[in-house]
Amino acid sequence: MSQTSTLPVLIVGAGPVGLLCALELARRGVPVLVIEAEPGTTLDLRAGTFHPPTIEMLQPDGVADAMLEVGIQVERWQSRDREHGLIVEWDLSALQNDTPYPFRLHLEQHRLTPILLEKLAAYPHAEVRFSHEFIGLTQHPDEVTVQARHPQGDTMLRASWVIGADGGKSPVRKAAQIEFDGYTWPERYSVVSTTFDFEPLGYADNAYVSDPEQWIAFFRMPDKGPPGLWRMTLPVGQELSDDEVLAAPFAQRAINRAIGAPDTDHYPIVHQSVYRVHQRVANQFRVGRVLLAGDSAHVNNPLGGFGLNSGIHDAVNLGDKLARVFQGDANADLLDLYERQRRTVAMEYVQNISIKNKENLEEKDLTKRLARFDELRTVAQDPEKTRAYLLMSSMINSIKRANAIT
């Protein structure tokens, strides 16, 4: 067995994955230090769908109950087509015997991070330092030294282990010289948020609308009051500049096109953003005493809501294993099992299905599109096929797959 250490586990990144890693370790008695380059938690409006197994994983820390108080429980979601309308409405109650949470929970991640910070503050052996930028690291046989920069100057931190939960551009991953294999999609994605209510038009709180020209993913998020905040994610061609995408006319055209309204109609726009989308997986999740979790380890397009969920699954898996290693109850080889389980799922499940979801939404061949619609309707008419489909799309199968790896 490995020897216990008095040095804390150092986590780089105070997003949901980093804070959850810290919480999972802290509640098991492991001292943790989180450093974050930003002066506080950030306002990220991209991720916001939580699948049933994710909610289950957040229950032991008391995080799930806090999320359920403010989030929107989505019991039904839709597969739609711009030309052909509603194809299938999926009822997650089909999973009532598979999970205590047979629904998706909509809650943007900037609402989750304060919950995690509050829970973490209950542990005196856990600390979060904002305005501390990771600069570099050096691995030693029994510890890692980390250089960080803060407003008062540079500082050297000693840690037993380092977890990089610092996003797709991860400086930790680069410092550990870990390759990030994959590619970047040529088109960008735009996010448009509006208080216009799509529900009277027949939209469920979550709907994926296929369209060979410009598909749209709809999500209703909690806001100050009804009808909530409707968020649209859609692809942007290379012919448009970022400034054009972020201008008001782009958002107005997107909404009008989605509902078939005249271009003269106008709607309240709350938020617009544009970003690039990647499909990449680190070729290692562990190098010595450095580990990766969340976007620093894998990134994917958002269709299906797998990104943040899989990052949370990383954090829970890693927190349990690293705590046992830290406390001397398991050999450090247990962390290689973390890599095998989570990297396999990232490759086989998250990457493959998110790519397939994108291909289905943007399919240009009418014959293939109609065949896909028929296939979905056939699945929806058979309870067993429906359950199998939802076990996959809800990520329950991904957890089973990871747990089967030894």
Image (cartoon, rainbow, N blue to C red):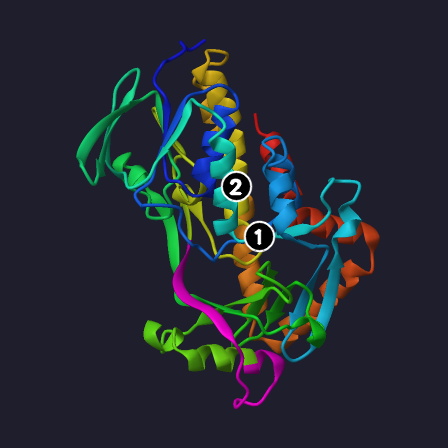
Tally of numbered discs: 2
Residue 107's tag is 1
Can residue 398 be seen in the rendering of this structure?
no
Q: Position of residue 230 (x, y in %)?
A: 58, 67
Quadrant showing the N terminus: top left
Q: Is residue 87 left or right of residue 245?
A: right
Question: In this orientation, which residue lies closer to the viewer: 375 or 133?
Answer: 133
The local crowd at label 1, few if under 14, some if 14 to 19, many if 20 or more residues have their Cα within 10 Å, is many
- Going by the numbered disc 1, the residue's amino acid type is Leu
Residue located at (71% from left, 75% from top): 200
Q: Is residue 325 left or right of residue 211?
A: left
Residue located at (36% from left, 42% from top): 166
- Going by the numbered disc 2, the residue's amino acid type is Ile
Would you identify the image quadrant in which residue 179 lies?
top left
Mark 1 element type: loop
Mark 2 element type: helix
* Residues at marks 1 and 2 touching, judged by CB atoms closer than 8 Å: no
Magenta segment includes 263:
yes
Identify whether 131 is placed above or below 256: above
Question: In this orientation, which residue lies closer to the viewer: 191 or 331?
Answer: 191
Residue located at (54% from left, 38% from top): 313
Which dot, 1 or 2, sits closer to the camera? 2
The residue indicated by pointer 2 is 115
Quadrant showing the C terminus: top right
Identify whether 124 is placed above or below 213: above
Identify whether 229 is placed above or below 279: below
Identify whether 23 is placed above or below 140: below
Residue located at (68% from left, 73% from top): 370
Over which residues does the magenta segment extend? 256-278
Question: In this orientation, which residue lies closer to the viewer: 318 or 388?
Answer: 318
Q: Earlier in the sequence, mark 1 or mark 2?
A: 1
